[in-house]
Image (cartoon, helix red, strand yellow):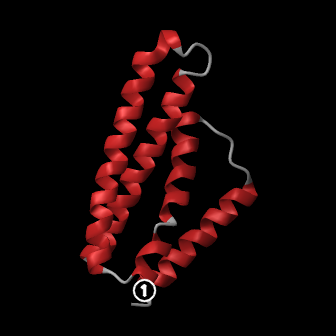
């Protein structure tokens, strides 16, 4: 059970890193020079979150078989989709939501098959 919880935490940390990268890209969309401080802050946050995720991922690999752990990282697709909708008000069409549903079903099937 601990391995599955750690995979979830790794996914959340990776998602947070991706969101920080998006914010850095938005900060530098028009004038990089005037927004350099903001860009750097967001990039440092992204590296921090993704670095923490990497360290936890190494622990996951000690606990779970790779054939289970790696596909479960598909949760990133789900988390990023919800986050893009929530934080950036991005439009997500029905086909994309259907894909997210299938990913969630696959994660559920893998989780209960152990």
Residue that numbered label 1 is attached to: 112
Q: Is residue 18 left or right of residue 63?
A: right
Q: Residue at x 53, y 51 (%)?
A: 80
Name, please, the residue furthest toward the top. Answer: 34
Which of the image's four quarters has the N terminus?
A: bottom left
Rendering coords of residue 23 (x, y %): 49, 30
Q: Is residue 29 left or right of residue 70?
A: right
Rendering coords of residue 46 (x, y %): 39, 40
Q: Quadrant of residue 8?
A: bottom left
Name, please, the residue furthest toward the front. Answer: 33
Rendering coords of residue 107 (x, y %): 50, 75
Q: Residue at x 48, y 14 (%)?
A: 35
Q: Is residue 23 left or right of residue 1?
A: right
**Count of labels in the image:** 1
Neighbourhood count class around disc 1 (C-alpha, 10 Å): few under 14, some 14–19, many 20 upward? few
Which of the image's four quarters has the C terminus?
A: bottom left
- Label 1: element kind: helix
> In front: 57, or 95?
57
Rendering coords of residue 10 (x, y %): 35, 60
């Amino acid at each position: 059970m601990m391995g599955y919880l750690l995979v979830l935490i790794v996914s959340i940390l990776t998602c947070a890193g991706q969101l920080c990268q998006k914010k850095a890209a938005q900060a530098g969309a028009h004038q990089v020079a005037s927004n350099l401080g903001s860009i750097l802050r967001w990039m440092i946050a992204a590296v921090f979150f993704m670095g923490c995720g990497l360290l936890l991922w190494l622990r996951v690999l000690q606990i779970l078989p790779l054939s289970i752990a790696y596909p479960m990282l598909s949760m990133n697709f789900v988390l990023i989709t919800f986050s893009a909708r929530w934080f950036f008000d991005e439009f997500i069409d029905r086909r994309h939501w259907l894909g997210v549903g299938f990913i969630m079903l696959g994660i559920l099937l893998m989780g209960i098959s152990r």
